[in-house]
Image (tube, rainbow, N blue to C red):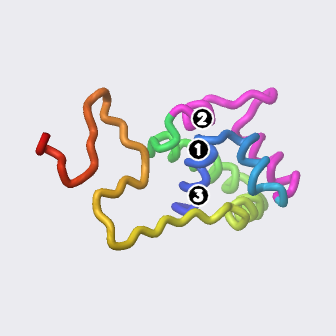
Amino acid sequence: MAIITPFLIELGKKGIEKFTEKGFESISEGTINWFKTLFFKDDKPKKALLELQQEPENKEKQNIAKAIIENSIEDNPEFEKFLKEILEKLPKVESTITNSKNVNTGNINSGGGNIQLGDNYGNL
C-alpha cells in the first residue's frame, strides 16, 4: 500500500475539505463518508489526522493513518473499493528534472541553521 503515501501526505498538508474540493469532485459520497468516519468524530478531526496535518512528511504519522485504513478494510473488505476509488482519482504529480544539479524538490528545514544551494557553497 505504498501508493497511498502520496495521498496521505497531501491529506496532511491540505486536510480533507481542501482535498475533496479540488481533484475529488468525482469521488462518490459513499467514499468520502467512509473516509470521514475513519478520521473524524463529531465533524472534528481525530488525533491521527490532526497529527498527520501537523507533520505530513512524518513516516510514523503516515503509518498510523495507513494502519487505520488497512484495519477498516480488514474489518470489511468491501471498503477496499472506496480506497481504490480514491487512489484512481488522485491527481498524478510528477517532477522531471534533467541536466541540472543543486536541485531541491522539497522543503528544507535546517532547524535554525543556514542553508545554501549552489556551486559557491563554502566559498563565502
Q: Is residue 64 magenta?
A: no
Label 2, label 1: how far apart the Cα atoms are: 6 Å
Q: Is residue 44 magenta?
A: yes
Callout 3: helix, strand or loop?
Answer: helix
Q: Nearer the viewer, residue 67 or 16?
A: 16
Name the residue tied to disc 1: 65
Callout 2: helix, strand or loop?
Answer: helix
- Quarter of the rendering containing residue 90: bottom right
Whole-percent x and y of residue 75? 71, 52
Q: Residue furthest bottom?
A: 99
Whole-percent x and y of residue 88? 70, 67
Q: Nearer the viewer, mark 3 or mark 1?
A: 3
Q: Which of the two discs, 2 and 1, labels the residue nearer the N terminus? A: 2
Whole-percent x and y of residue 29? 88, 52
Disc 3 marks which amino acid? Ile
Disc 1 marks which amino acid? Ala
Where's the C terminus, which quadrant? top left
Q: Nearer the viewer, residue 36 or 23?
A: 23
Name the residue tied to disc 2: 48
Q: Residues within 10 Å of mark 1 (few under 14, many from 20)?
A: many
Residue visible at 83% across and 55% down?
25
Name the residue tied to disc 3: 4
